[in-house]
Amino acid sequence: MIVPLGYRYATAYAGIRKETRDDLALIVSGVPAACAAVFTQNRVAAAPVRLSRRSLRESRGVAGAILINAGNANCATRTGDKVALSTARATAKMLRLTPAQVLVASTGVIGVELDAQLILNTLPRLKEGLTQDGFEPVSRAIMTTDLVSKTEGVELKLRRGTVRIAGMTKGSGMIQPRMATTLGFLMTDALLAPAVVSRMVRAGNAVSYDRISVDGDTSTNDTLVMMANGACGFRPDLKELPAVQEAVNAVLQSLAKQIARDGEGATKLIEIQVSGTAKAEKAVAIARSIANSPLVKTAVAGNDPNWGRIICAAGNAGVEFDPAKVSIQIQGVTVCKRGLAAPFSEADLKTKLNSPDVLIQVALEGSGRASTTFWTCDLTEGYIRINASYRT
Amino acid sequence: MIVPLGYRYATAYAGIRKETRDDLALIVSGVPAACAAVFTQNRVAAAPVRLSRRSLRESRGVAGAILINAGNANCATRTGDKVALSTARATAKMLRLTPAQVLVASTGVIGVELDAQLILNTLPRLKEGLTQDGFEPVSRAIMTTDLVSKTEGVELKLRRGTVRIAGMTKGSGMIQPRMATTLGFLMTDALLAPAVVSRMVRAGNAVSYDRISVDGDTSTNDTLVMMANGACGFRPDLKELPAVQEAVNAVLQSLAKQIARDGEGATKLIEIQVSGTAKAEKAVAIARSIANSPLVKTAVAGNDPNWGRIICAAGNAGVEFDPAKVSIQIQGVTVCKRGLAAPFSEADLKTKLNSPDVLIQVALEGSGRASTTFWTCDLTEGYIRINASYRT
């Protein structure tokens, strides 16, 4: 896959998770990079989230490395802040960065003490292992209940040359991105100012991570970081920035959709398109309500074109609309026309629903021209099996 | 069980649901009763909800009968309004009431035409079958995916005599009561003015139906009706009204808890107590967020004292609080003290969680003295099985 110039990666097994599978990862930029991030909106923010927020303020948007562990969220723990700070400091010292130039991110169980020593002992091994080819191992080391690793990379040709943008992410449960969800790391070799990176990651997040939900639970550790180290050797023209933003959005949307498709127990990616509202926020609210309806999600799991549950979920979004002006398509088949049942072949549509990709389109008439796209997954017995026994 | 004086009940199989099980019910008061109701807040309201709302306005809070069908929600259908109106009118004519004195309520699948003729043909049989002993058969006829019927009755001794209050309800899925949920019918033989009944049903709803959730889906048909026909022969003293309200609340809370316990696929009733907020609404928001977290509900199903998911869900309620001042008890065992893990025996608590009744207590410190109680159920593979194939 395409990876940006000027970054190195390493992973190791530090003993944080029981299973002997790499659980510690390091991403290092050859030179300190312009950096911005979005974090969880949960009132209960994990220690690494609080520290990274502060570090980005102190460094004024510059970071040289990200230290990530899986298997423990370092949230609601007695020593959480100390663990985050001491491991960030040790990493900074090792890489000759200022402490504020090292971000930390954690994912895993909440409320269990994280042993800093496990990480400190492993840091030298990580440093030795740093390699430009380590992108995909890092994407695997940060996985928890994920079944597949999630990466995306693109190249963008600009006037003065090519820039590369690549990202990785993890997440499968506790997913409802009210800001950033889970962990996501986006690297580019474009030369961009911190303020530009900040704008780009926010705009990209708004059309990607903020448009997916697996189970409506926003985690305590959500972190999406974007780094731009300038290793491509040039600064994009001002008028080329929209193209860079578009490439950023494309990578983030790909990553976000990979999360929804890999939702715990999921067998299908569901795309929900809502159109015809006065403002985009209203379309998003309706799409989110449909995406979070367990009744809609179980119906899709069972290949049941039960559009009554879709219009019911839309009606619960807290958005004013006229039910008599709502039309619904499932897999391109009109099942509800202006609020009423439309004739369709149940057998045919059941067959069409038996697909890894399901499209639900809700069109409102007469309210406006705003629209949105939102992604979620079906809800199966697998979700229950995974979550009735995750911690133990 | 205790039933109020002056009401008669009848049920019949009208052929609305496939299964040969009574699907039509009639509740009649001997004299037109003071009546009030609360209805769904879903933007998509079923035809019977719209008609009953209008009828209560037209009759100025007086009703003589309620016609209820199960198996079809009469929602998002071409002929819905006509079906609701024609069946209400025919019932009124049969019982010598004005059309506005007959309320209608429906529950079942959305988006399928309801054949009025099935109901009209069955009305004479219902009239013949009216009996004072028919309370419990009605509570069974209105069931859909419910496993058990849900009733409650109390007697209240007042200065001038005894009043009786009894209620029945149905509901198992599509349950998140943002007003009234599902169908609930409360009858009393107390003599009360329509305005008093209206106040009482609203106040009672606020501490019962509005405090439960099975799956966070608010239905299109939610209706809770209270009738007071005065058959006890006297009007309670003004200063006795709080006692009547308390009895109404007790009946409604019992019914609401029965719904939560019978949630689709549920094996446990979960009671969530949140205390220490500045305002009760904030406690409710936190409790609702915990009750609607699939991760909390699956953990309870698996007897897993995973309090990290509880504090995470609390943090998602949109309420400001200091995580370091949150303590959590599960089945009376402190698992989190001021935001941090408390020592407890995991094996013991797992055993305690293996119970049909689970208590989760979340105490905030230093914010205030408001509190709330909320009920939900665990989330099991049974919910998925039921809902991946409900319609077909």
Image: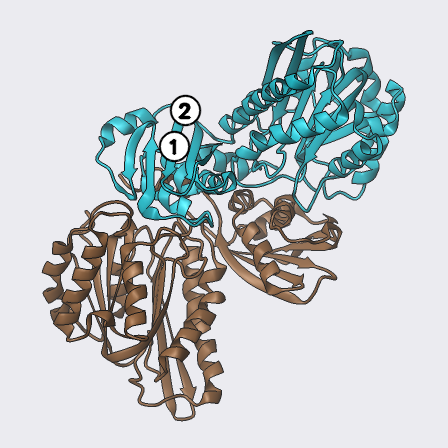
Chain colours: A cyan, B brown
Circle 2: residue type? Asp
Residue at the far top: name it: A161
Q: Is residue B85 left or right of residue A228?
A: left
Say which residue label 2 marks. Answer: A357
* Mark 2 burial class by Cα count in 10 Å: few <14, some 14-19, many 20+: some
Query: With B113 as the anchor, is B270 left or right in this view?
Result: right
From the viewer's perspective, tell me whether residue B183 is left or right of residue A92: left
The chain letter under disc 2 is: A
Q: Is residue A69 visible?
A: no
Q: Is residue A203 above or below residue B266?
A: above
Please determine whether, in this image, residue B17 is positioned above or below residue A266. Answer: below
Q: Where residue A145 sits: x, y (%)?
A: 58, 29
Q: Which disc, if any, is residue A360?
A: 1
On the image, the x and y values in percent for residue B91 come to 16, 67
Q: Secondary structure at mark 2?
A: strand
Q: For residue A368, what is the image quadrant?
A: top left
For the residue marked with disc 1, what is the amino acid?
A: Ile
Mark 1 near mark 2, Cβ–Cβ under 8 Å? no
Q: Is label 1 or label 2 in front?
A: 1
Q: Secondary structure at mark 1?
A: strand
Rendered-image quadrant of the C terminus of chain A:
top right
Q: Quadrant of residue A50?
A: top right
Question: In the picture shown, does residue B143 fall above or below A382?
Answer: below
**Looking at this view, is B57 or A313 the one in front?**
B57
Residue nearest the viewer, comparing A289 with B26:
A289
